[in-house]
Amino acid sequence: MPGPSPILARHGAVAASAAGIDAGVAWHYGDPTAEQRALERHGAFVDLSHYGVVTVTGPDRLTWLNSITSQDLTTLGVRESTETLVLSPHGHIEHAAGVVDDGETTWLLTEGSHAGDLAAWLTKMKFMMAVVITDATEQWAVIGEPVDAEGTDDEPITWRDPWPRTLPGGTRYGLPDDEHPGSERPWRLVVVPRPSLPDAVAAREAAGWRLAGTWASEALRIAAWRPRLATEVDHKTIPHELDWLRTAVHLHKGCYRGQETVARVHNMGRPPRRLVMAHLDGSGHLTPEVGAEVSAQERVVGKVTSVARHHELGPIALAVIKRSAPTDVDLLVACDGGDVAAGQEVVVPGEGVSVDRPAPRGPVARGLNPR
């Protein structure tokens, strides 16, 4: 992991928690509300130099990555962005990465704390393939910007976030793409040489863009229902629970680790949990911690995974709760100082059925109980 960002040295920068997922960069630069508004107006950018960068080179890189991860990468075009997941044999999410290929190198962008583990796992899976895997986090830094465009040939390596577009081979549990709140959040990550980060920041400020902190980018991510590996994923998360089949899973590609669980839950089962966005009652000025218990009808049903104060929506959170929890009741979120009421906005419906789930088969023999 690289050390703290040099941008933290500027006047007014407030560092993100040293124990948190965004340690090493700024939480804000003195005015988080104005930073959010500028980011939402597409007039700001964020130092995300704590993110991880893994590169894969060699002629087998895309076919090999396709065979061991959840996304179809065999037809990925040059400078075309997608994302993929590494799943356990039981279908649980272990790694997530934004993917873009420049014609010679496949770039995998992930959480900084996961980059080394991802590179190590890929190296173990290399076998006789003609690929070279490198944890390049020390050499490259990431900048986030609200731009809905792939990188061009004269730009640095750029990953365009596909969320919430339902990609070919994917499916959705939640709202249609054009009705989804994430459709109002264009986002891409630009990869620059780490020694050039101050110059890249200065160039954007000279062009009239405002530097914003992770408070702003996280608030807009939460409002867009966008799952994040470091927050919404635990040791038993499957992608269906987070509506992540939209962008990170191809349901009709060849075999890969965890595919049986993905197919079984999609075709026959229902995800055991579901993602919700919680609109927290801010009247008591209480803010829950990540991991806080979430209750419905006096029963603990899940936990908070992300929380932020949005400049318009007020305090909001993402939470992963039991699928069986009622969708039409308010939630209670545990806080130091007392529980806080929260209206739930359904991300993954309680019935747990995707829009293209195959119809159940009828009885195959006379007298067969259809139940």
Image (cartoon, rainbow, N blue to C red):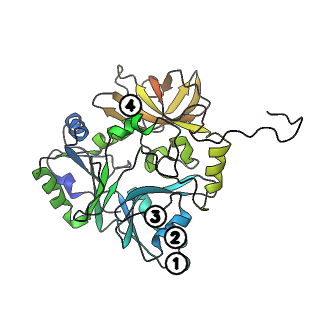
C-alpha separation, residue under disc 4 versus residue under disc 1: 46 Å
Name the element at disc 4.
Answer: strand
- Give the residue type that dot 1 points to: Met
Residues 42 and 175: in front is 175
What label does residue 256 carry, if any? none
Q: Residue at x 61, y 32 (%)?
A: 351
Q: How far apart are marks 1 and 3 (CA)?
A: 19 Å
126 over 312 or under it: above or below? below
The kind of residue tagged 2 is Trp
Are the residues tagged 2 and 1 within 8 Å (C-beta)?
A: yes
Q: Nearer the viewer, mark 2 or mark 4?
A: 2
Q: Dot 1 surroundings within 10 Å: few (below 14), some, or many (20 or more)?
A: few
Q: What residue type is labelled 3?
A: Thr
Q: Is residue 96 in view from this perspective?
A: no
Mark 4 and mark 1 residues within 8 Å of each other at the beta carbon: no
Residue 129: mark:
1
Q: Residue at label 4?
A: 316
Residue at numbered disc 3: 75
